[in-house]
Image: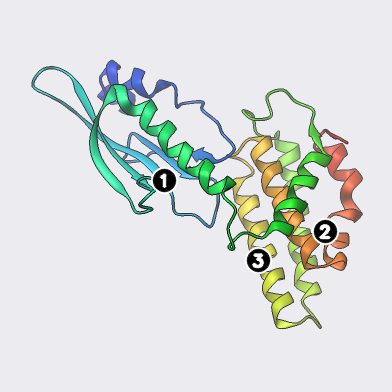
Amino acid sequence: MNKKKKLPITILKSLESFVNLTGEKFKIIDPKENLLHVLDIDSTSDFYFKIEKYEKKQNGSFQFLMNRKPTNEHENGNHRTWIDIKNLEPQFKSWINLLDQYETIESFFDDPIVKSNAERFFQKFDIIDENADKETFDLEQQLFLEEYLINSRKKLEKLKKGKTKEQVIEIEILENETEEIQSALTVESKKKIMVRLSKFWGRAQKTGLQVIKEIFVSVTAELAKRLMLGP
């Protein structure tokens, strides 16, 4: 039987608003054995929001088994508990609020240079598409970006020669980022991909002018043309 038809309509309706939901700080992935599975967009984070299953109480009302991380402002571990289905959206908004706070709070663990560089790169290009936060790049654009990322990885590998240990570590981080962006090309919106690319270029700029010239300056015009971006 279709998995959809194994669930009561009440449950499907309560999850319906999440089907096409998009945001800059999270991504909704295939729930598999869960009913809902959301991840922090930050690839270095292990924060998540899950609805594992539902149950019908004796009075006829429904509950969800929620599992999320972080718990709240005071604890960054996971929190697993039953909630009324009417509280799903408030609980999710509470989780998003925690991600927002992690993003905006200044700390000694942030890299302000990479952050400011990334913001400038993101502002440099406007995505000429009002649905950029909902739609992926088309197939030709995805193939172009895949080729660009593969070539960037090859260039980064060559740039490690003659560099200090610290510089090599930074370049290896960039290499890992190209792989992460490549794996996200077909599942994330245009806007999210541009956020990822902006962070990638921001880190590359801090690593060195030689690096940013190789992987960005030399292809700026082509990127803007192929991705339909405008200065």
Q: Which mark is residue 173?
A: 3
Name the residue that disc number 1 marks.
48
The residue closer to the viewer here, 132 or 44, is 44
Give how far apart the Cα atoms at labels 2 and 3 are: 14 Å
Q: Secondary structure at mark 1?
A: strand
Answer yes or no: do the residues labelled 1 and 2 have beta carbons within 8 Å?
no
Residue at the spot 43% in from the left edge and 31% down from the top edge: 93
Residue 138 picture quarter: top right
Q: Is residue 107 above or below residue 7?
A: below
How was the colour assigned to the protein in this rendering?
rainbow
Residue wearing tag 2: 215
- Amino acid residing under circle 2: Ile
Name the residue located 79 percent from the left edge and 80 percent from the top edge.
Answer: 161
Q: Nearer the viewer, mark 1 or mark 2?
A: 1
**Residue 107, position as x, y percentages in the image:** 58, 58
Mark 3: amino acid: Ile
* First in residue order: circle 1 vs circle 2: 1
Comparing 33 with 214, the one in front is 214
| Contact flag, marks 2 and 3 (Cβ < 8 Å) | no
For the question of whether residue 29 can be seen, the reply is no
Q: Quadrant of residue 203?
A: bottom right
* Residue 202 screen position, x and y as percent: 75, 55
Decide which of 31, 200 is in the foreground and name it. Answer: 200
Crowd band around label 2 with a 10 angstrom C-alpha radius: few (<14), some (14–19), many (20+):
many
Label 1 Cα crowd, 10 Å radius (few <14 / some 14-19 / many 20+): some
Which residue is painted at 60% across and 46% down in the image? 184
Residue at screen point 43% across, 49% down: 47
Give the quadrant of residue 217: bottom right
Q: Amino acid under label 1? A: Tyr
